[in-house]
């Protein structure tokens, strides 16, 4: 297979506050190899379960979508915590996306999106209860991936627990 180079930025008119996220991808069947833009050129792969025609040789794009949700929440919360003047420690997440495969697999009418996404987060922090409530609300509002999920119309269940900072 040909070696992939990182993507070039597509022509666009951008505000100075806009950071373009670009990647390139090649593949066959359900498997794909991707390269993220930027100097690091991070590489990753996707595949699908055998029931979806794949070989399950790499995580499904749906797992990446859910992983993006937890990761983006943690990054966004770090920015929000800085604004609030609170410290964050260790994190743990459990996330579940409930997918009715009837549209994806059988071609039925409807929305191929997750029906529901549930997020459970535990974060160590020195925030007061009021600061923690603001941290959760502002993270949900400011996180780009959370907004992709929420604005898609699925049922959204997001519960965070505050743990003592060690």
Image (cartoon, rainbow, N blue to C red):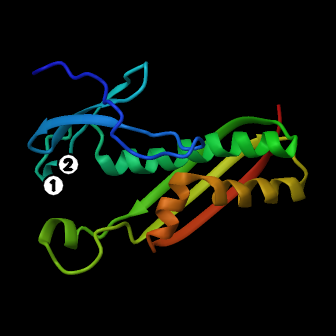
* As drawn, 22 above or below 157: above
Going by the image, does 1 lie left or right of 110? Answer: left
Q: Quadrant of the C terminus?
A: top right
Left or right: residue 29 compared with residue 135: left
Q: Nearer the viewer, residue 88 or 147?
A: 147
| Mark 2, other Cα within 10 Å: few <14 / some 14–19 / many ≥20 | some
Q: Which residue is mark 1?
A: 52
Q: Quadrant of residue 138?
A: bottom right
User: In the image, what residue occupies the spot 16% across and 39% down?
Assistant: 31
| Count of marks overlaid on the render | 2
Q: Mark 1: few, some, or many residues within 10 Å (few <14, many ≥20)?
A: some
Residue 84 is marked as none
The residue at the far front in this view is 13
The image shows residue 68 at horizontal and vertical percentages of 47, 45
In the displayed structure, would residue 104 be above or below residue 67?
below
- Percent position (x, y) of residue 17? 60, 43
Gap between marks 1 and 2 measured at Cα: 5 Å
User: Picture quarter containing residue 79?
Assistant: top right
Question: Height in image: 102 above or below 85?
Answer: below
Quadrant of the rendering where the N terminus is positioned: top left
SS at circle 1? helix
Residue drawn at (83%, 36%), measured in percent from left and top? 87
- The residue shown at (89%, 59%) is 130
In the rendered image, which residue does mark 2 sit on?
Answer: 49
Tell me: 48 left or right of 133: left
Q: Which secondary structure, mark 2?
A: loop
Q: Are the residues tagged 1 and 2 within 8 Å (C-beta)?
A: yes
Q: Position of residue 132 (x, y in %)?
A: 82, 54
- In depth, the one of 136 and 1 nearer the eye is 1
Residue 162 location (% of width, % of height): 78, 50
């Amino acid at each position: 297979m040909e070696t992939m180079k990182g993507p070039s930025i597509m022509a666009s008119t951008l505000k100075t506050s806009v950071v373009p996220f670009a990647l390139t991808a090649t593949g066959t069947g359900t498997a794909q190899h991707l390269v993220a833009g930027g100097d690091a050129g991070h590489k990753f792969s996707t595949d699908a379960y055998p029931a979806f025609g794949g070989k399950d040789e790499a995580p499904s794009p749906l797992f990446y979508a859910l992983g993006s949700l937890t990761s983006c929440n943690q990054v966004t919360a770090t920015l929000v915590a800085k604004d609030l003047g609170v410290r964050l420690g260790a994190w743990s997440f459990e996330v579940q996306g409930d997918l009715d495969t009837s549209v994806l697999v059988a071609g039925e009418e409807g929305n191929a999106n997750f029906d529901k996404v549930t997020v459970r987060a535990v974060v160590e922090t020195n925030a007061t209860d009021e600061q923690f409530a603001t941290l959760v609300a502002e993270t949900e509002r400011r996180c780009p991936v959370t907004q992709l999920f929420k604005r898609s119309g699925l049922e959204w269940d997001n519960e965070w627990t505050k743990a003592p900072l060690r």
